Amino acid sequence: MGIIKSKIFIYNGLLIQEYSDELNKEDMLVYFTGLYCDPEYLNVTTIFSDFTYASIVLSFKDLSEIAAYILKHAPKVQYISNAILVSKPITTAYSMIYETLMKVMPLYECKIFSTFKEAANFIRHDPKMLEILTKTSFNS
């Protein structure tokens, strides 16, 4: 069972997500269902998704179903940029498929990065401040 932690910073519209362990379709769907029920999510304009400690156990069908769920259920209130940080080749491959599947979502752009600094720059956050927020939010 995978672990997904997240924290929303309302003052700057930032959602930080930290994924770890073996993630499967059920883990992801349960997480996104809860996230979209959170009224604070409506303030999110940038997402930092850290997959550096995650192992993904998904088929292409699972990934397609997750993307379809997000497309159907995610609130579409404003533009959101999502930086996905990866460190493993398999996670990079899954993220590239996800990025392609999500190109049809209006008001949403995601990109994949291998360095923290590049990811932070994409979502227009100071890398040092983002690192502090990430570490203090999850006690990493």
Image (cartoon, grey):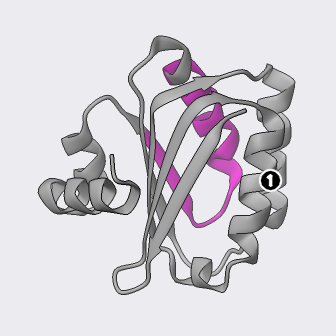
* Residue of label 1: 30
Write the residue at 58% across / 83% down.
40
Write the residue at 37% across / 62% down.
137
Total labels drawn: 1
| Residue type marked 1 | Val
Q: For this view, does 17 lie left or right of residue 26?
A: left
- Identify whether 131 is placed above or below 85: below
- Identify whether 106 is placed above or below 58: below
Q: Position of residue 89 (x, y in %)?
A: 47, 13
- Within 10 Å of disc 1 (Cα), the crowding (few <14, some 14-19, many 20+) is few
Write the residue at 53% across / 22% down.
91
Write the residue at 48% across / 67% down.
7
Residue 74 appearing in the image: no
Q: Which residues are magenta?
A: 92-111
Image quarter where the N terminus lies is top right
The prevailing secondary structure element of the residues shown in magenta is helix
* Residue 104: in magenta span: yes
Q: For this view, does 103 lie left or right of residue 11?
A: right
Q: For this view, does 90 lie left or right of residue 27?
A: left
